[in-house]
Amino acid sequence: MFTIEGRDRDTKARAGTIITGHGSIPTPIFMPVGTGGTVKGILQSDLEDDIDAKIILGNTYHLYLRPGTGIIRKAGGLHRFMSWNRPILTDSGGYQVFSLSDNRKLTDEGAVFKSHIDGSKHIFTPENTVDIQRAIGADIMMAFDECTPWPCEYKYAKKSLSLTHHWLDRAIGRFRNTEPFYGSEQFLFPIVQGSTFDDLRRISAEKVASCGMEGNAIGGLSVGEPAEDMYRIIEVVNEILPDDKPRYLMGVGTPANLLEAISRGIDMFDCVMPTRNGRNGMLFTSEGVINIRNQKWADDLGPIDPSGPSEVSTRFSKAYLRHLVISGEHLGAQIASIHNLAFYLKLVAEARRKIIEGEFEKWKTAMVKKLSERL
RNA sequence: GGGGAGAUACCAAAGCGGUCAACUGGGGUAGACUGUAAAUCUAUUGGCGUAGCCUUCGUAGGUUCGAAUCCUGCUCUCCCCA
């Protein structure tokens, strides 16, 4: 399911391919987030053509509440429901346990929570989140975990970790006792937790590695901790996670975060940043980060990004995009999202080429510097 | 021609003797956003040497210890009737 085609000379970076029932994914890869069966504001055809997304995310919590698994099953799975034939990865709802923490209570059994939509009461367990993801038909399913907040007391992180591990065993049990609904093979990725504590992270990585799944994930990072802590934890964990399986860093991050993580052996990423921040006027370009709402772009008739990661990047000017965003026009959010996602996808594709050529590190160092510039 | 209402900061619109440099929206400016309860949220928006001072509420005067608020003249706008 995962093959490695190349490795960088000087770093832990590698270039590989993940094969799923809905197509293969070159790594390193960035996965656009499509929480509720849509990458917000973007047409599937634009994801396929202009952005060339290889895989997108869906979210168990959101899809379960709306439209509900009944409709998705009736449609023949999420791929058919949303007319997307490339791979899909679903998050288990573990992140919502964290982000909607006011509305939930954790027990050994699972997480009892109130719907943010209508206040109705539900429970997520390691078992039923596998069932829901089976109904969704995700190519890659995630184990149900607790994404701990930051900062986090050692005592709490340790207790939470044992809960996550306990849940992991049960999720794998259910995974092994059930079959895909739609014929296409599904994988289940376990998630390393342990907050910013090296020893807990080691314990968790050992546990996850011992499960022998087709890929592994690192969660609980980029929740507010300094980037240096995140990089350190990645190094600690990747020492232990199997080298011949893809490693997925959940919820990360900025373009610079991606390159730093790739150099430490990460293969997969997802993040709302290119879409959400794009909708709010933040553009990632080959020249640096810009806030398109700033006055200084008002009369800049040059392209959004001359390096042209997407068709919209050179077709439209900064002044036009600024006008759209300032005016609250939906097209502004759409163009910004398309450009940002294409920028992310081009960035990881370029990283892949550099890795195969064995020249990743030098390129990465220069890029990180450039990408962090604020225009 | 007759009668009535009103003129407040970039726009709209509160305020109707001191607690008003003036509520609130919009607009402007800047910031935040990392497994999406976010096309959202926050700050700021007369000037300056900024715990203070200066200039502002159509305009010219007046009353008062004190006026955006009360009185008078003027200018302009809107509405109704003819």
Image: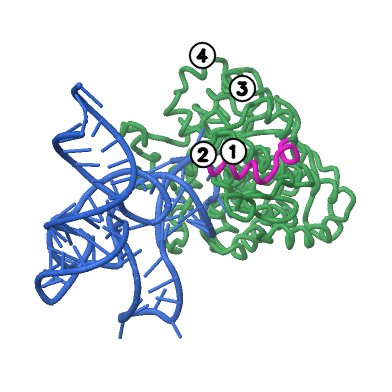
State the CA–CA distance, disc 2 to disc 3: 31 Å
Query: Up-down: is A157 above or below A317?
Result: below
Which of the two residues, B52 or A46, is positioned nearer the viewer here? B52
Q: Give the mark, 2 or 3, whose residue is nearer the N terminus.
A: 3
Q: Are marks 2 and 4 in contact (CB under 8 Å)?
A: no
Residue matched to label 4: A74
Question: Looking at the picture, which amino acid does disc 4 mark?
Answer: Lys
State the CA–CA distance, disc 4 to disc 3: 12 Å
Q: Give me the chain letter of mark 4.
A: A
Chain seen in green: A
The quadrant of the picture occupied by the C terminus of chain A is bottom right
**Shown colour of chain B:** blue
Looking at the rendered structure, whether the residues under marks 2 and 4 are on a common chain is answered as yes
Residue matched to label 3: A79
Q: Is residue A195 visible?
A: no
Query: Up-down: is A78 above or below B71?
Result: above
Query: Up-down: is A346 above or below B73?
Result: above
Q: Which stretch is magenta?
A: A312-328
Residue matched to label 2: A328
State the mark number for residue A332.
Answer: 1
State the CA–CA distance, disc 1 to disc 3: 27 Å
Q: How crowded is the residue under tag 2: few (<14 C-alpha within 10 Å), some, or many (20+)?
A: few
